[in-house]
Image: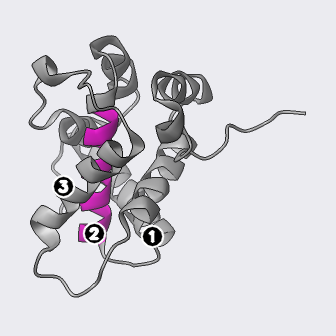
């Protein structure tokens, strides 16, 4: 894609493509579309399990284009659903992926894709912010995240 001439837009497009490349590698498939769907579904699940304040704090660390994906279709009135289980979290991701993958031959394991996205997020978001987000999640959902790095 040709540069737009707007540095901020060119930078966010480049950064988002790096994220998608790395997610695709984590999933074990070079298909960026799959990586995008996994990123989108996981971001929406995370967003919908967080408070408005935590969502805003996380979004501030996302690249501009990824931030747009994060807030796509967001309705804060639906926050804190009663069912905040691991199964509901993964179902949220699976639903996002199934909508666009119904005609694809390559199956994507929802938990594996979710863990891949969370590893990339953990690599790119400050450790303090990721720790806050992890702690805001129910214990069984927290298990999906990579362990926080230990400095010894």
Q: Quadrant of residue 82?
A: top left
Q: Which residue is mark 3?
A: 96
Asked whether 62 or 55 is in front, the reply is: 55
Mark carried by residue 27: 1
Q: Is residue 81 left or right of residue 28?
A: left
Q: Which mark is residue 34?
A: 2
Gap between marks 3 and 2 measured at Cα: 11 Å
The image shows residue 113 at horizontal and vertical percentages of 40, 62
The x, y position of residue 87, in whole percent, is 36, 48
Give me the residue at 17% from left, 82% from top: 104
Q: Are marks 2 and 1 in contact (CB under 8 Å)?
A: yes
x 48%, y 55%: residue: 115
Tell me: 131 left or right of 63. Answer: right
Sequence-wise, the earlier of marks 3 and 2 is 2
Magenta stretch: dominant secondary structure: helix
| Residue placed most toward the observer, 34 or 9 | 34
Mark 1 and mark 3 residues within 8 Å of each other at the beta carbon: no
**Mark 3 surroundings: few (<14), some (14-19) or many (≥20) residues within 10 A:** some
């Amino acid at each position: 894609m040709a540069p737009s001439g707007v540095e901020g837009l060119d930078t966010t497009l480049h950064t988002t493509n790096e994220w998608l490349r790395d997610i695709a590698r984590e999933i074990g498939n070079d298909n960026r579309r799959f990586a995008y769907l996994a990123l989108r579904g996981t971001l929406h699940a995370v967003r919908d399990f967080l408070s408005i304040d935590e969502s805003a704090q996380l979004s501030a660390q996302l690249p501009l284009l990824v931030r747009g994906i994060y807030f796509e279709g967001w309705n804060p009135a639906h926050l804190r659903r009663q069912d905040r289980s691991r199964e509901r979290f993964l179902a949220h991701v699976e639903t996002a992926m199934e909508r666009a993958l119904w005609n694809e031959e390559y199956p994507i394991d929802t938990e594996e894709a979710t863990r891949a996205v969370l590893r990339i997020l953990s690599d790119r978001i400050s450790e303090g912010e990721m720790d806050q987000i992890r702690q805001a999640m129910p214990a069984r959902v927290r298990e999906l995240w990579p362990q926080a790095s230990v400095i010894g």
